[in-house]
Image: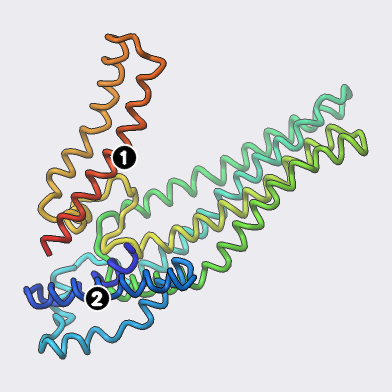
Amino acid sequence: MNTIRNYLDSLFLNVPKTAETQKAKKDLLSTMEDHYYELIEEGKNENEAIGTVINEFGSIDELLAELELEKKDSSEQDTEFFDAIDIEEAFDFWATVRRFAFSVSSGILLFCLALSTVVFSDNGSIIAALPIVFFFIFIALGVGLIVPAGMKYSKTFETLEDRPLTQETQKEARTQVKNYEKSFRSGLSLGIGLCILAIPSIVFFSEFLHLDTVGVSTFFGIAGIGVFLIVYTSIIYNGFKKMTKSHYFISDEDEPGPRATEETYGKNAPFINFFRRIYWPCIVVIYFLGSSITGGWSYSWLIFVIAGPIYSFVMEQGARNKNEEQ
């Protein structure tokens, strides 16, 4: 449902905020949500239902014409969002995400190959030293791929953090998500399948061929390829989705920037920021103090089980109150 709400928010981003437009937006959201639930009851999955609702939505210009309103012109939009992330920056970001995904997944694969080779070091011969050499080579190559890519990836996030997204960028991001969904599902399914297949490979080589070492080596090799596919496709897919979840770029969903927080929680933003900073540290302090005083270490950890839903409830309530204000 957040996808539909975010879609509407993006359409009304440059529409003057009046009581009339806010009522029209609220009524339209209610209609779209009702249609969404009807499609779910008909047997469509969540993505199909959301796609159908959005595709059946009419032009925003037609709605504004009925209200006798106009969008803000482009010059006004540029003034208000002078640092907005345009489509070119979005494509640069997605290219960085792809390079990062390949580097990280390749690094993990090299770590698995390192484990795959080191199992041959127990053969008790001079040649047995070679697996140790290859182990360190693969580890070094893996680290050499992951660390630089991670630093560049983090730097890219810093340049985009808490900046608004243009409507064109969000529209293109939704298109990219839709186009990549098939590849994501295929990669995820194949990766999980290979990880599962890696387990019986040990049994086959050990029980039928009596080659325990080869079985373990094959396990790490197959599992490494499976993890490569899962990590690679997941990072790319999440990179596209990052520009569809909000009007602002958020690198860490648990710690959105000031403008993103203001967008989500409205007048409740100062309280949410304060609550987010002190909540978990207070829970940890209460846990240790309470456990020390009562001696109930065996059950006091349940405070974290209870604290999680409470935290989620407060955050959702803050966002809900903001929507009611509109």
The relative height of residue 250 versus residue 92 in the rendered view (above or below) is: above
Q: Which mark is residue 11?
A: 2
Q: If the image is split into quadrants, where does the N terminus sit?
A: bottom left
- In the displayed structure image, the side of residue 297 where residue 201 appears, left or right: right
Residue 127 in which image quadrant? top right
Q: Amino acid at mark 1?
A: Pro
Q: Which mark is residue 309?
A: 1
> Outermost residue toward the front?
41
Q: Mark 1 falls on what kind of element?
A: helix
Q: Mark 1 vs mark 2: which is more N-terminal?
A: 2
The relative height of residue 232 versus residue 53 in the rendered view (above or below) is: above
Q: Nearer the viewer, residue 160 or 27?
A: 27
Q: If the image is split into quadrants, where does the C terminus sit?
A: bottom left
Residue at position x 61%, y 60% in the image: 187
Across and down, in percent, residue 172 comes to 39, 74
Q: Nearer the viewer, residue 161 or 273?
A: 273
Kindly check if marks 1 and 2 are in contact, taking CB atoms under 8 A apart as contact. no
Q: Amino acid at mark 2?
A: Leu
Across and down, in percent, residue 160 comes to 31, 57
Residue at position x 41%, y 62% in the image: 241
Q: CA distance from mark 1 to mark 2?
A: 32 Å
Q: Which mark is residue 136?
A: none
Residue 164 in which image quadrant? bottom left
